[in-house]
């Protein structure tokens, strides 16, 4: 699945202009009001951003992973909240249906996702199950041709906007084999949303708890129609998501570095631009070298990802995805820290984008698998391969 080269080049150029001409100028509004303007969301729908990864047969654009990371690299160069509006929708929110869903589930849901009519969220994390996702406690008990769901999901991105959830619940015994993936309508009786989380950064993104009390869901809403496959679905979905987070991290690092280099050229101390001082140049040089290394890794892993069927799990590719997620998100943290240092006191002031990117960057080392989880995945695969 990939868009032809000429069409993709046009799309990428359009996204680049959109980021620079419409999203970047709206960053201050986003920071002040904690909300993405409705007119920008409508423009995203018109551009087809809600269907980037959905195949053309379901009304989407059908990008390959190699193409998707290029788009996300551009989107990473502005506030993360803009991409968050549709990123979860076309990523972990709907990829489970695309990879493992039945033909009927794909026909019913994917066209709505592609048009932006339906916002889907991914509901895996719980108060007592984050990194250890296989220990989730939300239960789904069979009741005729339905399941009754009870439990609480935490930190669910886009939950306040969602029309449906890809939700993991326990249908069997302990461990990963007892987890199933459900498509749960957000307006189902018994679903309550907690208050919006107040976060360190990423203003404009919406996350909250999702509480389920005796929520009835048809058995036909189990993704793939087979209970007990939900954990495998979640892990496959997270592989693609982690790779795109890596691309976003590289985009954010590029923005911070560009802003820092520009500031170093303009800011004068001791009678000359601070960019002429070798210690400032060293910080910029380290950031550039790490950024180029990370971006090369992302593109290499994306190419490897495209070579395998998306519905299949490949331990070696998963390990490489974890390498990208680990390196690029940690790299972004270092680049953002150096960016603040280059800006000096101005870097600690909210008026400057580098201060906001510094706060926004911190989350990327946590969600969709912490740095430490990536280390475990890499280590385990190296031992298995040995």
Image (cartoon, rainbow, N blue to C red):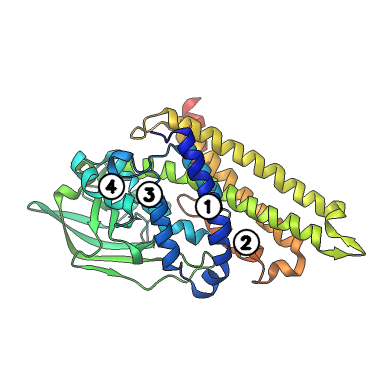
Cβ–Cβ below 8 Å for labels 2 and 4? Answer: no
Which mark is first along the chain, 1 or 3?
1
> Hey, which quadrant is residue 217 in on the image?
bottom left
Label 4 Cα neighbours within 10 Å, binned few <14 / some 14-19 / many ≥20: many
Label 2 Cα neighbours within 10 Å, binned few <14 / some 14-19 / many ≥20: many
Give x and y (percent) for residue 272. Answer: 90, 61
Q: Which structural element holds mark 1?
A: helix
Q: Nearer the viewer, residue 345 or 109?
A: 109
Q: Is 178 located above or below residue 359 in the figure?
A: above
Residue at which label 3 appears? 90
Q: Is any atom of residue 359 visible in this view?
A: yes
Residue at which label 4 appears? 110
Residue at position x 67%, y 53% in the image: 335
In this rendering, the label closer to the viewer, 2 or 3:
3
Which mark is first along the chain, 3 or 4?
3
Which mark is first along the chain, 3 or 2?
3
Tell me the distance, in whole angstroms, between the alpha carbons under discs 2 and 3: 26 Å
Is residue 150 toward the left or the right of residue 78 in the image? left
Is residue 33 toward the left or the right of residue 59 in the image? right
Q: Which mark is residue 358?
A: 2
Tell me the distance, in whole angstroms, between the alpha carbons under discs 3 and 1: 14 Å
Residue positioned most to the right: 271
Q: Is any atom of residue 371 visible in this view?
A: no
Give x and y (percent) for residue 118. Answer: 29, 57
Give x and y (percent) for residue 340. Answer: 71, 62
Q: Which mark is residue 75?
A: 1
């Amino acid at each position: 699945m990939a868009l032809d080269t000429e069409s993709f080049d046009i799309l990428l150029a359009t996204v680049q202009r959109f980021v620079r001409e419409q999203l970047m100028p709206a960053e201050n509004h986003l920071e002040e009001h904690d909300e993405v303007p409705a007119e920008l969301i409508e423009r995203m729908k018109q551009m087809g951003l809600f269907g980037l990864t959905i195949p053309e047969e379901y009304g989407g654009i059908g990008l390959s992973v190699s193409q998707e990371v290029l788009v996300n690299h551009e989107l990473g160069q502005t506030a993360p909240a803009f991409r968050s509006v549709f990123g979860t929708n076309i990523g972990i929110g709907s990829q489970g249906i695309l990879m493992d869903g039945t033909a009927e589930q794909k026909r019913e849901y994917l066209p709505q996702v592609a048009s932006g009519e339906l916002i889907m969220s991914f509901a895996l994390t719980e108060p007592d199950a984050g990194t250890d996702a296989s220990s989730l406690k939300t239960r789904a008990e069979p009741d005729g041709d339905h399941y009754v769901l009870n439990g609480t999901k935490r930190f669910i991105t886009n939950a306040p906007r969602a029309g449906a959830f890809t939700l993991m619940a326990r249908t069997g015994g302990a461990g990963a084999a007892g987890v199933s993936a459900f498509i749960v309508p957000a307006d189902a009786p018994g679903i309550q949303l907690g208050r919006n989380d107040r976060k360190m950064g990423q203003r404009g993104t919406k996350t909250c708890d999702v509480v389920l009390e005796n929520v009835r869901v048809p058995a036909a809403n189990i993704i793939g129609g087979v209970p007990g496959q939900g954990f495998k679905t979640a892990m496959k979905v997270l592989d693609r998501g982690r790779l795109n987070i890596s691309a976003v991290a590289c985009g954010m690092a590029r923005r911070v570095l560009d802003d820092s280099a520009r500031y170093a050229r303009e800011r004068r101390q001791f009678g000359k631009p601070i960019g002429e001082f070798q210690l400032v140049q060293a910080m910029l040089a380290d950031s550039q070298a790490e950024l180029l290394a990370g971006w090369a890794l992302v593109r290499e892993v994306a190419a490897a990802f495209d070579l395998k069927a998306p519905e299949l799990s490949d331990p070696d590719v998963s390990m490489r995805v974890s390498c990208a997620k680990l390196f690029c998100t940690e790299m972004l943290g270092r680049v953002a820290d150096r960016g603040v240092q280059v800006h000096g006191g101005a870097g600690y002031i909210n008026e400057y984008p580098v201060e906001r990117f510094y706060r926004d960057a911190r989350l990327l080392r946590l969600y969709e698998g912490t740095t430490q989880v990536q280390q475990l995945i890499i280590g385990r695969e190296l031992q298995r391969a040995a």
